[in-house]
Amino acid sequence: MMLFVESKKLKRTGFIAAFLGGGILASLIPILNMAVRSENFVGLSERPLKILLDANWQMMAMLNVLLVVIGACMMYYTEYADNAMQKMRTLSMKESTMFFGKFILLVGMSAVVLALEAATVSFCTVHWFSADTDFFIELLKNYGYTLLLIVPSAAFSLVIASACKNMWVSLGICVVCIFTATMISNKNFILSLFPFALPFQTFSEDAVKYCIAACIEMIVAGATELIYLKGRRAFE
């Protein structure tokens, strides 16, 4: 029921259009890169998926995280506009239920964006390289991995957005977090666990550690939101 209600709210915003437009833009990056500089990559001896991700993923991940942040801020902006949040509190609906409904929708749209990107990576591999069964298995593995790593940034973006009535404040905080993440070195494992830095990671020997960290951070974000909601109700 909550997912239906939240999806109805989003029809009055540009949420879906923003995600689809941003997803298409991110998906075009490997195609344009290969079309312009294919001679730099075709002769490499590494696996096609690794070549494509090494060349394009940082920019694609940046767009993905920006979409998540914008989506989270738009979701809560509609709640605070015209005192909609105050009106909702008079109903029997729990704010925590609303938060987790938004979280599921945000992750779902992120999955759609990643699916578009996986499709274009597959196209580039088939067109410029040679794709076999192992490639598509590896692609699915990377797809699930990147989707899991984007979940903490989605959760914490919603936590920040829910705490700020002004959308520009929450957007500014999240953008600062993103640029902080871009300055974190991948060689430092502890720093790379920053929620907004996780989506920039690609599948590696530390994949299991990153997956565990993503799950823990998702739980921490959910617990933080619940504590915040209880604290806010206590002071209202």
Image: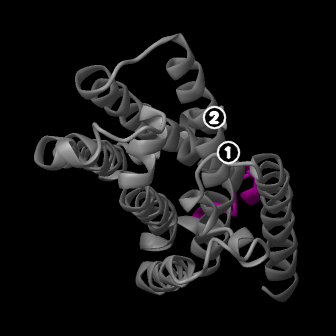
Looking at the picture, does residue 221 appear above or below residue 218? Answer: below
> Where residue 184 sits in the image (x, y, percent)?
60, 81
Q: Residue at x 78, y 85 (%)?
A: 236
In the rendered view, does 60 fall on the left or right side of 212?
left
Disc 2 marks a residue whose amino acid type is: Gly
First to last magenta residue range:
87-97
Q: Residue 161 falls in which quadrant of the image?
A: bottom right
Q: Please give the label number shown on residue 177.
A: none
> Where residue 61 sits in the image (x, y, percent)?
45, 57
> Where residue 177 sits in the image (x, y, percent)?
55, 81
> Where residue 188 sits in the image (x, y, percent)?
72, 77
In the rendered view, does 113 fall on the left or right side of 5?
left
Calculate the distance from the C-alpha at mark 2 to the C-alpha at mark 1. 6 Å
Q: Residue at x 13, y 41 (%)?
A: 35
Q: Is residue 86 visible?
A: no
Q: Residue 197 falls in which quadrant of the image?
A: bottom right
In magenta stretch: residue 95: yes
Disc 1 marks a residue whose amino acid type is: Leu
Looking at the picture, does residue 203 appear above or below residue 94? Answer: above
Q: Residue at x 33, y 45 (%)?
A: 23
Q: Secondary structure at mark 2?
A: helix
Residue on which the image places disc 1: 148
- Give whichever of 63, 224 is nearer the camera: 63
Residue on which the image places disc 2: 144
In magenta stretch: residue 67: no
